[in-house]
Image (spheres, helix red, strand yellow):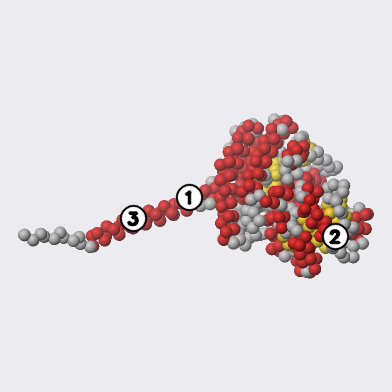
Amino acid sequence: MPKTILGISIVAISLNVVLGAKILGLFPLPINSHRNLYTPLVQELVQRGHHVTVISPYEETIDSKNGSLRSIVLTGFVDWMTDGMKHVRTFDLADTNIFQKLQTVLTFLETMSEMTLGHRNVQRLIHSKETFDVVIITELLTHAHKALAPHFKAPLVSFSTIGLSSFTNLLVGNPAPPSYVPDLFSDYSSKMTFPERLTNSLMHLYTQVCFNWYVYPQQKELMKKYVPGEYDFDQVIHNISLVLLNSHPSINQPVPIVPNVIEIGGFHIKPPKQLPQDLQEYLDNAPNGVIYFSMGSNLKSAELPMAKRDTFVKTFAKLKQKVIWKWEEDVLPGQPENVKVDKWLPQSGILAHPNTRLFITHGGLLSTTETIYHGVPVLAIPVAADQKLNAQRITKEGFGLLLEYHEISETTLTQKLDELLNNPKYAKNAKECSKIFQDRLTGPMETAVYWVEYVIRHKGAPHLKVAGVDLPWYKYMLLDVGLFIVLSLVLSLYVFCKLTKILISLCVPSKSPKLKRS
């Protein structure tokens, strides 16, 4: 009995190390899809008894008898985003190349990074005397934000909403050979042709150059400007204790990951709630099934060009299936009888219904994750960001098809829908992917919380970091070794040629001059 009591006491003491921990979360991106990701994690940490401070564009609230939640609002961010998007035709992003996409992202994130650190509410916290047990930030190339970890004397957890990317690989020494790991902004699969591998490699090098000669210096200046104290920028950005990845092998291609990178894809998914009565009846009374169509929370179907919109309307009108369409305006011109529209729809609940036959989506990671979870076939129409990459994975796993935005027509749309609805292999493959996705040792949310608390318990868990994080990028990529080998070969060849020329001159007697006859 005494040993049992002692054991319980030891466990209680070890749990007290993390129960009631002070956690700071920085999630500045004013986009609903990102909010839908970090909110469940924050809520779970509060329910576990932690005291969480969240810096975000939204007023976050939660009722809990265990921990607490304090919201520091980045006022003005939502309006800034809304005003900025007024002049952007989002569907035109489908026609930009990967280099243009990267430059657009870098410019946007640079502005947001300075707005965040310079915000009066954030400055008030920075100049307080508070400390935290861990700092969690969204990994967005906003590296100056990472200085909040040493400033508040806390280990750093990076939260990647898009899975692995060049954003995080360089910071934790994670290998990502461009021979089979496509760039985030590309639409390549893991099996690339030679031209694709060449482009992917050039993109990899271009990213390195952008990061080291543009992003890092600019972020270093922001760190010095807004975060008091003397910090070594290289140490700040590489001192990441843990990376939480919104990925899983059933969604993303399998890649090597270092010990402090943890996959938690699907952590935000909860059992669907009861559907509204009208929607429940609409789905129940669909003998031929239902197609669900949504372009996500950032892309809006209502902003589709008229020709593209009419293509969907005319194609849907010819189907025997019902259609539920997320349409953000009051009226859909020419709305067919078999189409139901609404500005907001409970996506997970619709996908969970047994009569849902197909999901037409932009291929965003959250939508892709939810459709895999529920085992529903997909027609992916990617436009921007990682959507083309996700669409390639969908086709590779065989539970969906890709329709390029610029190829949308009544003919192509009808052909894709006929194939997906009438060929049973897509539904079968979707169910198989769902089984793989859900077959885990522990749930993804349990995994996420465990590792955050692990970092707190072990004071940053430095034993998980690989030596690659301490190497400059040119050493990590063995460029210095490659240069040495090339110079050595050139020098050896030069010496060989010189010696050969000397030996030839010694072995071959020179012709004696002819004597002139007198």
* Disc 1 from disc 2: Cα separation: 62 Å
Amino acid on which disc 2 is placed: Ala
Q: Tell me the mark number nearer the camera, choosing from 1 and 2.
A: 2
Residue 476 position within the rendered picture, expressed as x and y whole percent measured from the top left: 54, 50
Q: Residue at x 73, y 31 (%)?
A: 120
Please rate how many residues cluster around mark 1, counting C-alpha atoms within 10 Å: few if below 14, some from 14 to 19, many from 20.
Answer: few
Please rate how many residues cluster around mark 3, counting C-alpha atoms within 10 Å: few if below 14, some from 14 to 19, many from 20.
Answer: few
* Disc 3 from disc 1: Cα separation: 22 Å
Q: How many marks?
A: 3
Q: Residue at x 76, y 53 (%)?
A: 366
Q: Which residue is mark 3?
A: 495
Q: Tell me the mark number nearer the camera, choosing from 3 and 2.
A: 2
Amino acid on which disc 3 is placed: Val
Please rate how many residues cluster around mark 2, counting C-alpha atoms within 10 Å: few if below 14, some from 14 to 19, many from 20.
Answer: some
Image height of 33 relative to 196, above or below: above
Residue 99 position within the rendered picture, expressed as x and y whole percent measured from the top left: 61, 48
Badge 1 element: helix
User: In which quarter of the view is residue 442 placed?
Assistant: bottom right
In the picture, the disc for residue 317 is 2
Q: Does any portion of residue 210 appear in the rendered image? A: yes
Q: In the shown orientation, is residue 510 left or right of residue 131?
A: left
